[in-house]
Amino acid sequence: MQVLMNILSSLTSLYMLLIFVRIMLTWFSGARYGKPVELLCQITDPYLDWFRRFPLRFGILDLSPILALTVLSMANNVFGTLGLYGRITLGIILAMLLSAVWSAAAFILGFFIVILILRFIAYLANRDVYRSFWGIIDTLSQPVLYRINRIIFRNRLVNYLTGLIVSIAVLLVLRLGLGVLVRLLIGVLSRSFL
């Protein structure tokens, strides 16, 4: 049983790598790659398409691949744990689930922190925000800025730079604070439900 679980863990790791490569290739949609990439698409697209059915698209940002990788990561952790110990507890499953969800959430928070920092640098450097790169950055940053500033400042008007700095600070505090809380919960869950 443990040998089978180790094999399944290795296979899911390989599949996660293939999916990651496929996701990276979508960033270069105009390029032609040939037969190897066609084969890669045939292997990975059915799995990725299943997650695209869910409403996880926010403007130009599609979060369905993150969910797809999170599910595979969770399965990989279960297989790896069963392969290593030969058994698994409810607490460990809950800890793995929390860890997988947090990994996805931490990635999204980190992504938006980087986007807002890029926007902050562009603002200070007085860059031309009408170029395509900065347009994408603005498209991604504006909804986050709006929501955070609406929560923090309610209906008061604040200048753009203040709103940007406060939004970066809020996301950093969330990322760090929730990270500590999640690690504590994972530790408690791993030791409980034996």
Image (cartoon, grey):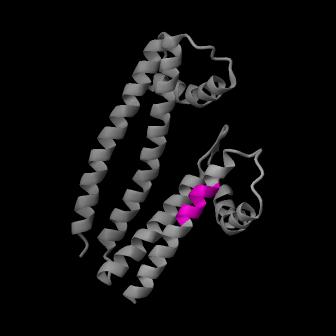
Q: Position of residue 138 (x, y in %)?
A: 60, 24
Determine the residue positioned at 57% across, 60% down.
68
Q: Position of residue 67 (x, y in %)?
A: 54, 56
Q: Is residue 156 visible?
A: no
Is 23 displayed left or right of 71 in the figure? right
126 vs 193: above or below: above
Q: Nearer the viewer, residue 85 or 57?
A: 85
99 vs 170: above or below: below
Q: Nearer the viewer, residue 103 or 19?
A: 19
Q: Position of residue 15 (x, y in %)?
A: 56, 68
Determine the residue positioned at 54% across, 24% down.
146
Q: Quadrant of residue 101?
A: bottom left
| Span shown in magenta | 16-22
Is the magenta region chiefly helix, strand or loop?
helix
8 vs 160: above or below: below
- The quadrant of the image that shows the C terminus is bottom left
Q: Nearer the viewer, residue 151 or 130?
A: 130
Q: Is residue 143 visible?
A: yes
Determine the residue positioned at 59% across, 63% down.
18
107 vs 81: above or below: above
Say if the magenta span includes residue 21: yes
Is 17 displayed left or right of 151 in the figure? right
Is 97 displayed left or right of 68 in the figure? left
Q: Nearer the viewer, residue 104 or 3?
A: 3
Is 171 displayed left or right of 37 in the figure? left
Q: Position of residue 163 (x, y in %)?
A: 46, 17
Determine the residue positioned at 51% across, 66% down.
72
Say if the magenta span includes residue 19: yes
Tally of numbered tags? 0
- The quadrant of the image that shows the N terminus is bottom left
